[in-house]
Amino acid sequence: MRQGRCPGCGASEIYEVEAPSRAGGHLMLRLQDTHMHKSFPLQTLVCTECGRIQQRLSLNEKQKGHLMRALGRKIT
Ligand SMILES: [Zn+2]
């Protein structure tokens, strides 16, 4: 969807929406080493044709470092 096309219906009506941080705009994760909770910002894209949404973490370098400390089991 980041390329501007919906993988579900093929429409090109993809928009970025701003979700409030307490309503899905952030992902809260626990750091494995300190057990502290950290908030990670999400980018939310929506297809106005079929309603599909896609979210991805939108991280700077510092937040990437925090994310590495929050990772659990690797899925293989
Ligand atoms: Zn769609």
Image (tube, grey):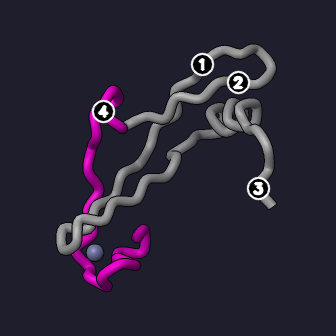
| Disc 2 residue type (three-letter) | Leu
Which residue is disc 3 drawn over? 75
Q: Is residue 32 left or right of residue 41?
A: right
| Disc 1 residue type (three-letter) | His
Which residue is disc 1 drawn over? 37
Q: CA distance from mark 1 to mark 3?
A: 22 Å
- Considering the numbered disc 4 on the image, is that residue within a helix, a strand or a loop? helix
| Disc 4 residue type (three-letter) | Ala
Which residue is disc 2 drawn over? 31
Q: Residues within 10 Å of mark 1 (few under 14, many from 20)?
A: few
Q: CA distance from mark 2 to mark 4?
A: 21 Å
Looking at the image, tell me whether mark 4 or mark 3 is earlier in sequence order.
4
- Considering the numbered disc 2 on the image, is that residue within a helix, a strand or a loop? loop
Q: CA distance from mark 1 to mark 4?
A: 17 Å
Q: Quadrant of the C terminus?
A: bottom right
Looking at the image, tell me whether mark 2 or mark 4 is earlier in sequence order.
4
Residue 73 spot, x, y in % from top left = 79, 43
Please tell me whether the stretch drawn in magenta is mainly helix, strand or loop. loop
Which residue is disc 4 drawn over? 23
What range is drawn magenta here? 1-24
Residue 70 spot, x, y in % from top left = 71, 32
Q: 13 or 29: which is nearer to us?
A: 29
